[in-house]
Amino acid sequence: MSEVHLLFLLLPLAALSGWYVARRGSERTSGARVSELSSNYFRGLNYLLNEEQDKAIEVFLKLAEYNRDTVETHLALGNLFRRRGEVDRAIRVHQNLIARPSLSDEHKTIALLELGEDYMRAGLLDRAETLFTDLVAMNALAPSALTHLVSIYQHERDWNKAIDNATRLEAATGESQGAVIAQFHCELAEQARGRQAMEEARTCLDAALAAENDCIRASMIRGHIEAACGNFEAAIDAFEHVAELEVDYVPEILAPLLDCYARAQAMQRAEQFLLRMTERHQGVSPVLALARLYARTQGEKSAVEFLTRQLHQRPSVRALMALIDANLHSAHGEARESLLIQRDLTRKLLEGQAMYRCSRCGFGAKAHHWQCPSCKNWSTIRPIHSVVGE
């Protein structure tokens, strides 16, 4: 929700506050006080419509002060302060609400949840964790508190606690958290692989696949583990399974998969796989890999002819650069100088270009990430299919 939307949310609350005070004012105060409230309300509305948000907030704060029982107004103001980055003010608003002895249990739990979000925004994760844990123990707003706890443990890379709270969230809401839990198990598998604890890593991958049967990342990590252990046939099966599950991940597995084909002396199987991928995958990575294979097995001329045909079907700057490199081997004199200039220009076209993009928030990256660095969603980063991309 945007700041403007939140401010408009304050309008009926501020108006209700003004009406309430005006009604009570008719019993105890003069008409001048009622007129002042009405004037302040419309002055705040005017500031809002003119996008003078700071002035509008100050007016609505004064209106809220007239009746300190308007809990919704204070909650909305605290939320707005947090969204604007004024976390200290948001914390004070929510702490003052919680301190009220007359506050209902329902409003208190809402204010505690908002205060926890303030702490998260301020980077006070230990305070936020304690507060959300207490809310879960009280079974108050448990799904929201559990969601925030999962977010905190992701940030702290405490994957075991993240798994535990995601599992509890699934039980509380009935909504599957399998895909996210599988990612957490994969993170643990990567940590184990980094320590060369391969059996522990395999156990984590089994847990990931139990959480999400078709977890692409688990199959990919299994391929790397089997390759590191010299089990090249098993590694090939795992990597090929990734391609069958999601063809967009082909660029991520090609290098280790081709190495496994070579070590297993299965280059005919490699060619068959690459031919299937050039038909299924609209990107250029399988084409480039197949061209390199043809250059080794059939000669540079066959590779150049293949690349030329493919460029007509799927224009690509990366494929053009590969074609230029292939022609450089036999070029001399002015022809070679011309090709060097073309290669330099194509390289500059690729420099700084994002090769991947998040399907949720649009974040662009040069390398693949399993978790989007911007919106923190999992498995949303995909290759960009374009002339200068994949």
Image (spheres, rainbow, N blue to C red):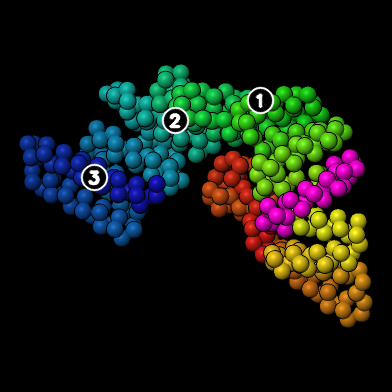
Residue 77 placement (x, y as % from top left)? 34, 42
Q: Upstream in the sequence, badge 1 or badge 2?
A: 2
Q: Secondary structure at mark 2?
A: helix
Dot label at residue 12: 3
Q: Which residue is mark 2?
A: 144
Question: Which image quarter: residue 217?
Answer: top right
Of 72 and 388, the residue lying toward us: 388
Tell me: residue 151, above or below residue 385: above
* Residue type (three-letter) at the residue carrying disc 1: Ala
The residue wearing badge 1 is: 207
- From which residue to which does the magenta span run? 258-284
Q: Is the stretch drawn in magenta largely helix, strand or loop?
A: helix
Q: Earlier in the sequence, mark 1 or mark 3?
A: 3
Label 3 residue SS: helix
Label pair 3/2, CB-CB below 8 angstroms? no
Q: In terms of depth relative to the viewer, which is nearer, 236 or 78?
A: 236
Q: Are marks 1 and 3 in contact (CB under 8 Å)?
A: no
Residue name at image x 31 percent, y 60 percent = 50
Of residue 199 and residue 308, the one placed in the foreground of this image is: 308
Measured in 3D between alpha carbons, the distance from the residue under mark 1 to the one under mark 2, in whole angstroms, is: 25 Å
